[in-house]
Amino acid sequence: MRSNQRVTCPICGGNCFLLDVVDFNKSCEEARGKFLELSGIPIYYQFCDNCNFCFAPEIALWPFDDFEQKIYNNHYIDVDPDYIEVRPRGNALRLISMFKGHAQSIKHLDYGGGEGVLSKTLRDAGWNSDSYDPFIEKGNDIRDLGCFDLITAYEVFEHVPDVHQLMSNLRLLLAPNGIILFSTLVSDANIKKNSRLTWWYASPRNGHISLFSKKSLVHLASRYGFNSGSFSTGFHVYFTSIPNWASHIIRLNGQS
């Protein structure tokens, strides 16, 4: 794909334009003042003028093996040192606090759960929790997993090359009246037309190739029959209806 080739937005079908080009080694650790050597590999990000979705279409076309070799390799910990233990344990503790008293009635799946640390922490606390990661369990058929009342997807949306495959999988795995809790930073005020892509979260070396605005998240939810809401700029929910066990965390002012 050429950098000047016309690209259609995969979320809303709107016209996209070339926003900027960054080096492949641009990583999230730059926010902490840690910089990798330039790779010399240009990564072009397109921007949708309608829903403000920003993405790297060339990386999105990579085969599975390229992601494993170039991004999710043994050096990935250098650009995301918290992904193995710190973040999943912290997220598990927050879930335990959020759903205190309801663990026994919730069947939970951590989608994109890596080595399963979050689910193991929840199981140790008495939860019925499983983990699935398409990069680790790529030979498994997700239809064998069953359906879940609660699906979490922490730091997953920004990594996916195909947002519709992700949404189809989540739709398939979600039980009727279940909810999806997910984290991804929205780009509002951080990515703008006619401005350079300097936002720290726009980091191809971390695999951050799909950068969502709030508008694009709402559009994506609607396309798959979900209501949506945001608790913050980084924590969101998709649902069809609010189950009793989740009513205490989903408020009307959190819906979009």
Image (cartoon, rainbow, N blue to C red):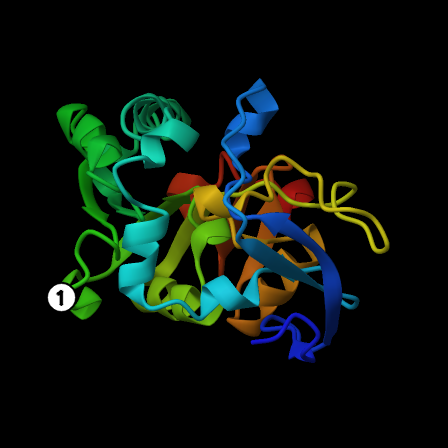
> Amino acid under label 1?
Asp
Q: Which residue lies at the image location 58% right of the left edge and 37% below the top edge?
A: 234
Q: At which x and y percent is residue 116? A: 20, 38
User: Which quarter of the picture shows residue 220?
Assistant: bottom right
For the residue carrying disc 1, how many other residues have a C-alpha within 10 Å: few (<14), some (14-19), or many (20+)?
few
Residue 180 location, x and y as percent? 42, 51
Examine the rendering and report whether any part of residue 182 can be seen: no
Question: If the image is split into quadrants, where does the N terminus sit?
Answer: bottom right
- Left or right of 111 on screen, residue 37: right
Closest to the observer: 244 or 53? 53
* Total numbered labels placed on residues in the image: 1
In this rendered view, identify the residue nearer to me: 147 or 27. 27
In this view, the residue farthest toward the right is 194
* Whole-percent x, y for residue 245 in the image: 38, 41
- For residue 46, above or below residue 32: below
Is residue 41 found left or right of 218 in the rendered image? left
**Residue at horizontal 19 percent and vertical 51 percent from the top:** 136
Element on which disc 1 rests? helix
Residue matched to label 1: 144
Relative to 26, is 69 above or below? below
Give how far across and how far down residue 236 sits, in percent.
54, 44
Q: Decide: is 195 above or below 14.
A: above
Q: Nearer the viewer, residue 96 or 145?
A: 145
Judge from the rendering whether residue 147 lies leftward or rightward of residue 59; answer left or right: left
Q: Residue at x 34, y 36 (%)?
A: 76
